[in-house]
Structures are given as C-alpha cells and as structure tokens.
C-alpha cells in the first residue's frame, strides 16, 4: 500500500518509521545519505498539511538509554535540511512525547528518541513488542513505513505499529522496492552482479539466488580469498573462511553448469599487515606469497572488472573490493564505482546496495546521481536480493 491509500492527511498525525541509522563520529554525522533519503516522504506529508512524527533507531543500545546513541544529531541535521526546527522528544511515548505532539501545528515535524532505548522494541516476545507499539500508536492517526533499511526486521516501531493504525509504505520504501525488483525480476541483459566485502558467509543467500538470474558474477573484497583458495591457490594471511571453501567450490561448479561467467581478480595488492601505511606490492592472483595479506584487487583486475561492468545493461553491486578506508587499498573499489558510473552513462540500470558500499562511493567522492539507485539498505537490500520475504513489507500488504 502506498501513501495515496491513506487518503487526505491534512491535520492528521502521521507516525513515520525512518532509517536514520547513520555513521557517527562523536556527534558528527559522517554520511547523511539516509537522512536525505527520507526527505521526499517528509516533504510530501508536510505538503499535505500532516503533522509528521518520526521514529528511528540509532545503533544497537540493547534496550538501554545510551546517551551516545541519542538521535539529537539527527534532529539537528534534519532541521537544517528542512529549514524548520525539529524538536526531539525524550522517549517514544509518555508525557514529553505527548506534549510535543499536542503542540504541533499542521506541517510540523517532531522526532521521537531512539526506539531501541526501550527493550520492548526488539523483544523476542511478540506480545511485548505489540504492547510497546500500541503505546506509540496512540500518538498517531496513521503509520507510514519508510525505513527501508529495517524492513527485514519485525520490530515494534516498524512492524507491530502497523497492526494498530492504517498503514502504508512511504516514498523511499516504494522507490527501493521498485529499483531492486527491476534488477531481480526482469533485468535487461547482460546482468552483472558485483560482490565484495569481508565475508562470503554474509553473501551465501545472494550468490545462491542470483546464480540462476545473473549472466555474470564478479567477485572481489575479502571474500574473494575463499574463492581463490577453492581454486587451489595460496592466499597467504588474507581473510579466509576455511569452512566455506567447499560451498564455494560448489558455486564455481554451478556457475559453469549454468553458463554464468565467474570473474575473479587476476592480480592482488598484498601487504605485510592490516595498516594504512603497510609496504605493499602487486602479485598475480595465483602466486600470492605465504605470510602476506591481500588488501585490494590489483590494476589488471581493476581494468577487467571495470570493463565487465561497462559491458552490462543491469548491474547490482554490494560490498567494497578492498580496504577502501586506507587510500593505498581503495583503487579496486574506485574502479568498480567508476565502472557503474560509466555503465549508467551508457544507459545501463545500476544499483549500489549496502551501507558500506554506499558510504564507500560517497567517501571516494562519487556523486549520488552517477548511479541509477543507491540503496539505503544494508541487510535489507541483501535479503531482498536473496529473494526472502521481508516482514516490514509483508505487514503493509
Ligand atoms: C542498517 O544499518 O542496516 C539498518 O539500520 C538496520 O540496523 P540493524 O542491523 O541494527 O537492525
């Protein structure tokens, strides 16, 4: 159900679940992409004359009030972006939240404090989550689910609330679902999936689901060493998941049987240790020296990955190619991002998925509009690509 299904919202109190789980350095927001992504829904609701009551989590405070995880920096940044003051209530229900909501005029915006400061939000007991959600729901006349990054969770503020109020998906959730479905349901071909990040065990479901949909699988990042090991190569002291080597051997075989092109790096940047200034050199992927660790894909692989991406009509990318936080090991990730930008210019549909990849492209200086879609979801976009049913979407049906 989309916003339209809620009818005329003038003067109505609309509870909106957003994903404001932004990376913080103290109280400084390092990437405000998720806050910006929530603006279309907030502006649409304000434009209709609704009172917008925002709910969100920050980090994993485990049901306790953790002052460092207060949403105060988010309220400030949101206020700057909207050009209005955004008061922060001290809780998600109770006297302060009620007073702040009672004082709202049409078009006003209020943010409720971190929903995860209350243990009921993430309780394993559904009745507890429901009771919590019912208290929050009293503040609103309708519920809009716009935190795409949490739709893979069934928690109080994004799932249970929908049981107590007329509910609909917000514009961000609608946009994310459209973009990700376009890639997974009927992709224009060639369809290339680029996977990186540290652990292959995080990507098993995605690989399994996409092995029957993609034309080409490009693998980099820490997880690639489990692939190289599965091919019988030495991987030195690189990240390795020994217990996944057999599974990966199976993927290599399935890819061959299904005619999916599996693209692995041909060269690797190896370093002495996991440090920004560690001495490093480029070696062939099948000749890594023992005792050294791979921290990025090498220059030949950068060109290979870039060219394979540009030769695609649909591209989904999740996970950095190397330790992009260290400039010496960021070139692989940069080459892949550039590949997506060049493919987009040539008319391909490109998606950057996952919190790390989104932050990586922004930190490397790529503009958001260089890609067809940057997903705000980390775990949520992966589970979507795995083809799983997402509770936060299901509850809106
Ligand atoms: C995310 O950062 O992926 C979302 O905000 C979900 O956070 P969580 O993994 O702590 O539920």
Image (tube, helix red, strand yellow):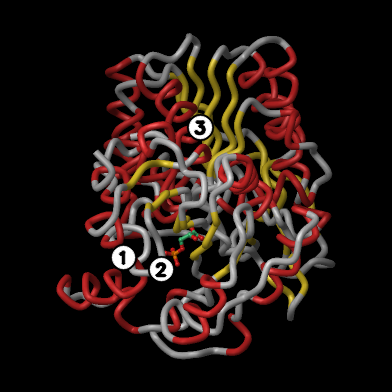
Of residues 183 and 162, the one nearer the viewer is 162
Of residues 389 and 87, the one nearer the viewer is 87
Packing grade of label 3 (10 A; few <14, some 14-19, many >=20) is some
Q: In the rendered image of this protein, does residue 21 appear above or below residue 388?
A: below
> Where is the C terminus found, in terms of image quarters?
top left
Residue 88, how many percent across, how many down?
62, 75
Which is more foreground, mark 2 or mark 1?
A: 2
CA separation, marks 3 and 1?
Answer: 22 Å
Q: Quadrant of residue 106?
A: bottom right
Q: Quadrant of residue 89?
A: bottom right
Which is more foreground, mark 3 or mark 2?
A: 2
Give the side of residue 222 with respect to residue 200, left or right. Answer: right
Cβ at disc 1 under 8 Å from ligand 1: yes
Mark 3, residue position: 175
Residue under the image location 50 percent in, 78 percent down: 97
Mark 1, residue position: 155
Earlier in the chain: of badge 3 and badge 2, it is 2
Of residues 175 and 79, the one nearer the viewer is 79
Where residue 227 is drawn, which disc sits there? none
Where residue 139 is drawn, which disc sits there? 2
């Amino acid at each position: 159900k989309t916003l339209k299904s809620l009818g005329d919202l003038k003067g109505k109190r609309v509870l909106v679940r957003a994903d404001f789980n932004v990376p913080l350095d103290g109280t400084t927001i390092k990437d405000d992409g998720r806050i910006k992504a929530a603006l279309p829904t907030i502006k649409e609701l304000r434009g209709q004359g609704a009172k917008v009551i925002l709910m969100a989590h920050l980090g994993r405070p485990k049901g306790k009030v953790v002052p460092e995880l207060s949403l105060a920096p988010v309220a400030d940044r949101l206020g700057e972006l909207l050009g209005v003051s955004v008061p922060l209530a001290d809780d998600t229900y109770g006297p302060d939240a009620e007073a702040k909501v009672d004082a709202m005029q049409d078009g006003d915006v209020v943010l409720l404090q971190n929903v995860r400061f209350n243990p009921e939000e993430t309780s394993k007991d559904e009745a507890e989550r429901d009771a919590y959600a019912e208290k929050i729901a009293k503040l609103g006349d309708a519920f809009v689910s716009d935190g795409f990054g949490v739709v893979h969770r069934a928690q109080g503020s994004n799932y249970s609330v929908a049981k107590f109020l007329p509910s609909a998906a917000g514009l961000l959730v609608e946009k994310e679902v459209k973009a990700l479905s376009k890639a997974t349901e009927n992709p224009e071909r060639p369809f290339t999936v680029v996977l990186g990040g540290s652990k292959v065990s995080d990507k098993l479901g995605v690989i399994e689901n996409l092995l029957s949909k993609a034309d080409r699988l490009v693998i980099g990042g820490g997880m690639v060493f489990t692939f190289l090991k599965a091919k019988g190569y030495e991987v030195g002291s690189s990240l390795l998941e020994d217990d996944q080597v057999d599974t990966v051997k199976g993927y290599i075989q399935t890819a061959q049987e299904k005619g999916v092109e599996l693209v692995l790096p041909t060269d690797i940047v190896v370093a002495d240790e996991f440090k920004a200034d560690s001495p490093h050199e480029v070696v062939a992927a099948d000749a890594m020296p023992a005792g050294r660790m791979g921290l990025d894909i090498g220059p030949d692989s950068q060109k290979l990955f870039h060219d394979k991406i540009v030769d695609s009509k649909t591209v989904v990318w999740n996970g950095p190619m190397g330790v992009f936080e260290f400039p010496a090991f960021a070139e692989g990730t940069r080459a892949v991002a550039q590949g997506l930008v060049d493919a987009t210019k040539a008319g391909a549909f490109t998606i950057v998925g996952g919190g790390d990849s989104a932050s990586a492209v922004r930190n490397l200086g790529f503009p958001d509009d260089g890609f067809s879609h940057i997903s705000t979801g980390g775990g949520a976009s992966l589970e979507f690509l795995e083809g799983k049913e997402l509770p936060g979407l299901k509850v809106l049906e």
